[in-house]
Amino acid sequence: RTVYVNGEYLPEDQARVSVFDRGFLMADGVYEVVSVLGGKLIDFAGHMVRLRRSLSELAIAEPLTDDDYLAAHRELIARNDITDGLVYLQVTRGNPGDRDFAYPPEGTTPTVVMFTQSKPGLADAPAARTGWTVVSVPDLRWGRRDIKTVQLLYPSMAKMEAKARGADDAWMVEEGRVTEGTSNNAYIVRGNTIITRELSHDILHGITRAAVLRFAAEAQMQVEERAFTIDEAQQADEAFVTSASAFVMPVVRIDDAAVGSGTVGPVATRLREIYLEESLKLGV
Ligand code: PMP
């Protein structure tokens, strides 16, 4: 693979980042994942808006313009011959030359790393026809989950617990209510109503979430932004998750209970179709 590091395109085994990089030592950095379908970037502009917000919340200098990021995404897609897949982008506070809790002085250049992952047939994932199973785990993350930091150890542990319990993913629960999945936003469906947790510091503001809620409203579905319990989710008609890489993924089982019929339902199926169709039209 060819990867991008600080303005250069290099074979992956020649790319280098310092051992003193704040991303490496302190998880002091943020990231974005943009999916590629048929060579087009899905919801690129939305991801760039969130990247800027994450950087600004952490007072990390803005390294590149949107045009620079877009050009680099396209260059990597071309060089790696990506039709369907992802582009991963990470910006860290950079390398101050030593380890210190205090942020380095202004003028320290952020480190920008980008790479691609090829995923042929990404939009036709067989899992979308059978649905995911999820298990509930306590949400033990920090209090600013709206910032998309590279500090992903707890979600990673939760994913491992899900696997150990034979499930596809975990839904994290705080004060009795679902926050989100390990790397996706969580929803339930009751009749014609889609319910998903409101935006706050407690969850990541999903770019796919914003698009799906817009498409749902346009398709005359009701949208309720509020938290729900595992109990309510188990008794819902349907459940699903959204993310840039899973799009809309049905959830058919939560802990020991089937959701609705225990099979993929019509609302999740329809929203997945609409999301893929509409966001492909808007792809750049
Ligand atoms: N929540 C969390 C915790 C995530 O990691 C992600 C994906 N990065 C999402 C939600 C979904 O966000 P998006 O739709 O922007 O991919």
Image: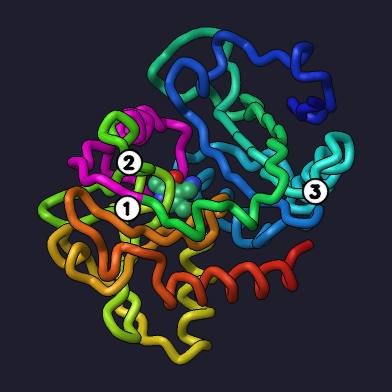
Residue ID for mark 1 = 180
Residue type at mark 1?
Glu
Q: Is mark 1 within 8 Å of ligand 1?
A: yes
Camera-near label (1 vs 2) is 2
Residue ID for mark 2 = 167
Q: Kindly identify the residue that appears in the image at 76 percent across and 19 percent down.
A: 12
68 above or below 11? below
Give how far across and how far down residue 242 sits, in percent.
46, 59
Please tell me whether mark 2 sits on a helix, a strand or a loop.
loop
Residues in magenta, as a range: 133-160
Is residue 93 found left or right of 40 in the rendered image? left
Is residue 35 found left or right of 169 in the rendered image? right
**Label 1–label 2 contact, CB within 8 A:** no
Residue ID for mark 3 = 83
Give how far across and how far down residue 43 sits, in percent.
65, 62
Q: Kindly identify the residue that appears in the image at 45 percent across and 25 percent down.
A: 27
Residue type at mark 2?
Ala
Residue type at mark 3?
Thr
